[in-house]
Image: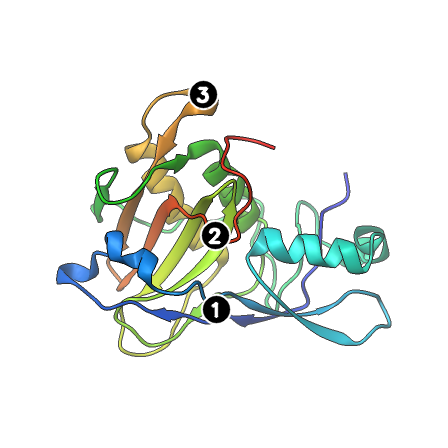
Amino acid sequence: MLPKFLLFSLLGLTHVSAAPSDGHLIRRQFKDYGVEILEWEIQAFPSGPTLVLNGTIEEVNDQLLKINPNFAVDFSSELGEGMDFVGDSPAEPSVEKRTDFSGSRYMCDTRDWVPCYTNRIKNGISHLRRTSGRPKNGPGPGNCGRVSCSGRSAIWWCNDERSTKELGAFSSIADGAQYLVDRCQIGRGLIAKMAGQVFHKTNWNVIVRYDDNNCGTFGPSE
């Protein structure tokens, strides 16, 4: 099966300045901040101009396929095995080193946040693991950007440093989301839900939560 889409150059995350609370926990008031979205520099056709598309991984995929329905075929020779798209750095190896979240402070929050569907989050994790490039986020603390959202189930990552932060790979964000899946899931199968936030020791965090801002129809699957 051909990958869904190819990204040539990742500009990084634009961010929302979320007012930090104690320990930079972002609770219900998070919804009061506008959704700032990623910008991607992309060619939709092999000899075409570079475009700037905005959105999560899923949104950019849809935009590219509307512009060029044969996108995956046109760029198939550029893609590495198992990759959805190519960013501005080499792809991670198929068996990459996981980001260490052991001992990280985390919270499973279904009181302040509406839970989302775990199955949707797992799909987002899979996309992030197949994304090359290095995510960037502006100075914090509490600067957050949404990297994946489908079925109103979103993955965010936030920078708690006072300077711009760049991670080694999008798979690091996926590792944070997976850490929460393993600890915060309620129920089993397609109806399983979750919400939570985990803090990495190097001053950034990952949030998984319900999100109804341009994020599809609420449900566990298409």
Q: Which structural element holds mark 3?
A: helix
The answer to whether residue 36 is above or below residue 175 is below
Identity, as a three-letter code, of the amino acid under mark 2: Ser
| Pointer 2 local density, CA inside 10 Å: few below 14, some 14–19, many at least 20 | many
Q: Which residue is mark 3?
A: 189
Q: Which structural element holds mark 2?
A: helix
Residue 187: quadrant of the picture = top left
Compute the Cα span from label 1 to label 3. 32 Å
Q: Which residue is mark 2?
A: 171
| Pointer 1 local density, CA inside 10 Å: few below 14, some 14–19, many at least 20 | many
Compute the Cα span from label 2 to label 3. 24 Å
In which quadrant of the rendered image does the C terminus lie?
top right
The answer to whether residue 155 is above or below residue 47 is above
In which quadrant of the rendered image does the N terminus lie?
top right
Identity, as a three-letter code, of the amino acid under mark 1: Leu
**Residue depicted at 79% across the width and 60% down the height:** 67
The disc label shown at residue 13, or none? 1
Q: Are marks 2 and 3 in contact (CB under 8 Å)?
A: no
**Residue depicted at 43% across the width and 50% down the height:** 155
Q: Which structural element holds mark 1?
A: loop
Measured as percent of width and height from the top left, residue 197 is found at 28, 48
The answer to whether residue 131 is above or below residue 203 is above
Pick the residue in front: 43 or 17.
17
Q: Nearer the viewer, mark 2 or mark 3?
A: 3
